[in-house]
Amino acid sequence: MSKRMGRRLFLQSVGYGVVAGPLAMRLSAMAPVTQVAAPAAVATVGDLKLNVKDYGAVGDGVAKETTALQRTLDRCAVLGGGEVAVPAGKYLTGAIQLRSKVMLRLEQGAELVGSGDFDDYPVSEVRWEGKWIPGHVALIYAMDAEDTGVVGPGKITGNDALGGRPRKESPLRHPALIEPMRCRRVKLDGFSTSYHLMWSVHPTECEDVAISNLTIRSTGGNGDGIDVDSCKRVSIDRCDISTGDDCISLKSGRGEEGYTIGKATEDVTISNCTFADAIFACIGIGSETSAGIRRVKITNCKFTAARSHAIYIKSRPGRGPFLEDFSADGLEASGLKGGFLRFNFTNSGIQDPDPVPGLVGIPTAKNVRISNVVLHDCPVLVDGAAVNPEKPVDGFALINVTGTCRKGITLANMRHVELKNIHVTGLEGPLLQTYNVQGKGLEGAVTMEAPKSPGPVAEPAVAYKLH
């Protein structure tokens, strides 16, 4: 074992805590208890009020308004902060940068429309699928700002011609729609968005982000709604999201780069939202998990369509390090093509060129609790077979589930499972199939064959360094 790997394993054991003796025996017999997510702090701005039309904006949808919009934001910032109002009209613009202590307000009938020229979006280091790469900044972006954001009731429309993925012949990341990076106390409230083939809202390495009352439309291709990337204390409330790819995705970096930087996504609450997805999942936890994801709470949400699953918790060997303290309560799901819940810790996402090697690279998962669920014609209740036996899931509870479902629950390599009050009709096979599972409520389970699982990633010949 290398010195670096030994240190990793030591730090991991210290981070999770070591409990011995009778106390450990009592704890191991308890049902999983997820920790409560910490709330996000509120953004506050100055008292100044400026109007973009006083600084040259026209709002006719023809001439580019980038200079006028940016000048208003900048002037508000240097004068102490406040609110920049965008009155009714259509404003064609390239990328604009939010400033500290400044809130951009889109009034009723106001629409920001993204330019179709890539040159209107400066190039910087941006995050893409868990990696920092060169790319175009978003239509609305912020860097290292505090107390800022966008409020409605207006609209933000990206230029669909700019959507798409980086490719070998064009490696720059395409512009997202809204992207605060390394910011604190961000507010996004009360507006609607439209953009295709790229992410709509992408807070990255931010703290205290409040997202509420948004209507997000991003159907077709890799068009995630909200991607929370290595952030702390994020609330998403009363949003209506219909997308091509994940409605919400929680990430924390990929491979050795994400693991070495070590910025987890933690303390995320998702409440009172409606989700519809046409290509993948409504809520995806991972698969970029290399700095960890913890304390996620979902309450009172409705899933109306999903190409795969309503909730998909995912990673793979080479990602590491953990997904823990996840709870969901008061959910209703229909229109699902794959099923309600899936665990996939064996092969989700592309492997990183510099994966996290050894046992640390196999993600740890613990304390997942889902309760009070109503299902309508669900294909599969829980697909939980893709769990690596090297690191069984430690703590999974599914309680109070009703509705119609064609296939039941498959679980493999799990400890401290609790299944209770699961009453679904329409099953075409057994309710429960298990392999190497321990816990409560497993009576009558049918034993399944051991699923195949990949082993740890081998240690590289040369130790990884950030570069």
Image: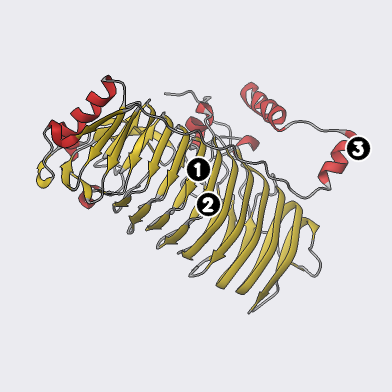
- Residue at image location 46% in from the left, 24% down from the top: 466
Q: Which residue is mark 2?
A: 271
- Looking at the picture, does residue 278 appear above or below residue 20? below
What type is the residue that disc 1 sits on?
Ser
Across and down, in percent, residue 366 comes to: 68, 45
Q: Residue at x 73, y 62 (%)?
A: 434
**Residue 282 appearing in the image:** yes
Graded by Cα atoms within 10 Å as few (under 14), some (14 to 19) or many (20 or more), the crowding at tag 1 reads many
User: In the displayed structure, would residue 76 be above or below residue 195?
Assistant: above
**Residue for badge 1:** 235
Q: CA distance from mark 3 to mark 1?
A: 38 Å
Q: Is residue 323 left or right of residue 272?
A: right
Looking at the rendered structure, the secondary structure element under dot 2 is: strand
Image quadrant in which the N terminus is located: top right
Disc 3 residue type (three-letter): Pro
| Mark 1 vs 2, N-terminal side | 1
Q: Are marks 1 and 2 in contact (CB under 8 Å)?
A: yes
**Residue 186 figure quarter:** top left
- Residue 309 location, x and y as percent? 52, 61
Q: Quadrant of residue 175?
A: top left
Q: Camera-side residue: 387 or 113?
A: 113
- Crowding around mark 2 (Cα neighbors within 10 Å: few <14, some 14 to 19, many 20+) is many
- Helix, strand, or loop for circle 1? strand
The amino acid type of the residue labelled 2 equals: Ser
Which is more toward the observer, 316 or 342? Answer: 342
